[in-house]
Amino acid sequence: MTHTLRLAEQLIARPSVTPDDAGCQDLIRQRLSPLGFVCETLVSGPDNFRVTNLWAKFESNLPAAHSSQAMGTIKTIVFAGHTDVVPTGPADQWSSAPFVPTHLPTPDGPLLVGRGAADMKTSLAAMVVACEEFLAATPQPALNIAFLLTSDEEGPANDGTVVVCKALQDRGETIDCCIVGEPTSVRRTGDMIKNGRRGTMSGKLTVKGVQGHIAYPHLAKNPIHMLAPALADLVGIQWDTGNEFFPPTTWQVSNIHGGTGASNVIPGTVVVDFNFRFSTESTPEGLQQRLQAVLARHGLNAGTDYDLAWTVGGLPFLTRPGTLVDAVRDAIRAETGLDTELSTTGGTSDGRFIAQICPEVIEFGPPNATIHKINECVAVADIEPLKNIYRRVLENLHARCSGATSLT
C-alpha cells in the first residue's frame, strides 16, 4: 500500500458529510506541519452549520537573490479542495459500508470504493504526498506552497472558501496559482482539466395578476397569460455566442408555480425560477438588463406587474494557456503520455471564489463518472499517477521560478 492510498483511505473513513469535517483537516495538518507548513484553522457559520476551514502555508526560505523573483516576492502556488462529502444515500445499496474504504476487484484492476473517493479525498491525499516528496527532494524551493481546504463546498458554500479568500484579501496576502483538486478527468486521469467555469445566476420572477373565477375572466387578470408572450421570447434569445473556451450562455427555466389547485380559479400570481449559465462574453448586469427589457417590451412593468429577485452564484473565470496550464499539461504528458483537453464545462466549484483573488486557477483530479453516486470510486491504478502529476507540477513551477523566466 502506497502512502497516497493509505492517506486516501484514512480520509474516506472519516464520515465528513457537509459541513462536518470529521477530523480530515486535522489529519492533513499532522502531515503538513512537520514539513514546515504554518497551519491556521478558520471556523465560520452559525451554530447549527459550523464550517471548518484550513489555510496552511509553506514559506520558501530561498533568498530572493537566488530566484528569478529577485525584484519581487516569491510566488505562491495553492492546492485547494474540500474535505466534506455529500450524503451517502441508502447505505444498503452500496457494495460495502460507504465510509469503510474497500477494494473492489474488477477485470480492469481494483477500485477504491467509498464516499469521497473521487470527490475529492483521493486528490487531497495525492496533493499532500506530492508535497512531502517534492520538499524531501527540494528543501529550498523557489516558491511558496499553500493548502486551502474547506468543509463547506458541497453545502451552501457561504462559510467555506469564500471566507478564507476574504481573510487573505483583508490582510494583503496574495496567491498566484491555484490547483483545485476537483475530479475533472473523463476516462483516464489527465485526459481533461478545467481551465475555467461558467458563471451562474438565478432569478425568481413573480408576475402579479388578479385572482378570479375562470368563468369570468373579465373580472380577473391571468398572470400566466401576461407572462406567456415574454416567456416565449426569452426561450428563443441567443444571449451570446461564447468564445474559444466557453459555449454560448444559456437560459433555462427550472420551475413554474401557478394556480390554487382548483381548476376553476384564475391564479393571482405565477412564479418562474430560472438560471443563466454564462460565459465571459456576458456580465450579470448585462443579462439582467436584457431580460427586463424583454419583459417591458411585452407590457410588464417592474414593481406593478412583477417582482424579480436575482442571485449571482458565481462569476465565470478563465485561465488562458500560460504558466500554470503549461506546467500542468507538461506534468500530465510526462506522467501519462496524454495531451490533456482544456474544458470549461460542468457546474460551479470553489474555483469561482479563488479566481477573484488569484490570476491563474485550474481544476484537475481523477475521473468523475461516479461522483455523488452509490459506490463512488477511483481506480487504484490512478492514484499514484495523480500524485506524481501534482509533484511534477511543483517541479515544473520550481524550475520556472528559479530559472530565467518568472511567474507572471
Image: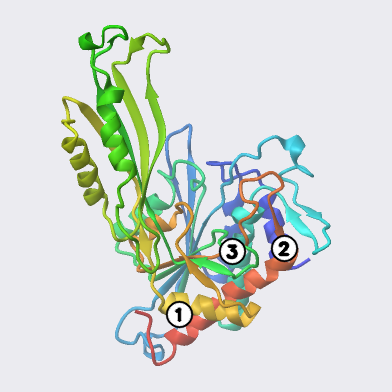
Residue named by callout 2 = 5
Q: Earlier in the sequence, mark 2 or mark 3?
A: 2
Give the image quarter of residue 204.
top left
| Residue 68 appears left or right of 212 | right
Label 3 residue SS: loop
Kindly tell me whether residue 5 is visible in this rendering.
yes
Asked if marks 1 and 2 touch (Cβ < 8 Å), the reply is no
Which residue is at a point 64% across and 59% down the rendered structure image? 122
Above or below for 139 versus 309: below
Distance between the Cα atoms at labels 2 and 3?
19 Å
The type of residue carrying mark 2 is: Leu
- Name the disc covering residue 185, or none: 3
> What residue occupies the far bottom of the structure in this picture?
404
Label 2 residue SS: helix
Above or below for 263 versus 170: above
Distance between the Cα atoms at labels 1 and 3?
35 Å
Judge by depth and name the residue closer to the eye, 138 or 184: 184
Residue 405 appears at what percent x and percent y?
A: 38, 89
Above or below for 11 versus 130: above
Give the image quarter of residue 159.
top left
Residue named by callout 1 = 61
Label 1 residue SS: loop
Q: Earlier in the sequence, mark 1 or mark 3?
A: 1
Asked if marks 2 and 3 touch (Cβ < 8 Å), the reply is no
Which residue is at a point 32% across and 24% down the rendered structure image? 270
